[in-house]
Image (cartoon, rainbow, N blue to C red):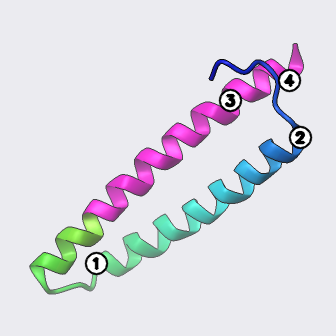
Amino acid sequence: MKNSRYGIHEIVDLRELLNFKWSCLDEAKQRVKVIENKELKSLAEESIGQLTASINKMNEFISASAVRMQQ
């Protein structure tokens, strides 16, 4: 994150993508409860981990950009 300025459209796009990721995460958590196949369940749980990591990273970026935009 070397760039100190972000366009409003970039932040809006990132927030839209973040909302989509949250929706996918919610859906994956609901579906993993009913999966019986161990291999499929493992893949679903891995997907949940990746979505969570992605969401956390995006939240960090949004927080940093909000601070920079206020300055």
Q: Is residue 51 magenta?
A: yes
| Residue 63 image label | 3
Specify start and end residues of the magenta stretch as a single range.
46-71
Task: Tell us which disc is closer to us: 1 or 3.
Answer: 3
Task: Tell us which disc is closer to us: 1 or 2.
Answer: 2
- Residue that mark 1 sits on: 33
Packing grade of label 3 (10 A; few <14, some 14-19, many >=20) is few
Evaluate if marks 3 and 2 touch, with contact meaning CB atoms under 8 Å apart.
no
Name which residue lies at 40% across and 76% down: 30
Sequence-earlier tag: 4 or 2: 2
Sequence-earlier tag: 4 or 1: 1
- Residue that mark 4 sits on: 69
Evaluate if marks 4 and 2 touch, with contact meaning CB atoms under 8 Å apart.
no
> Three-letter amino acid code at disc 2?
Ile
Helix, strand or loop for disc 3: helix
> Three-letter amino acid code at disc 4?
Met
Q: Quadrant of the C terminus?
A: top right
Mark 4 vs mark 3, CA separation in Å: 10 Å
Q: Quadrant of the N terminus?
A: top right
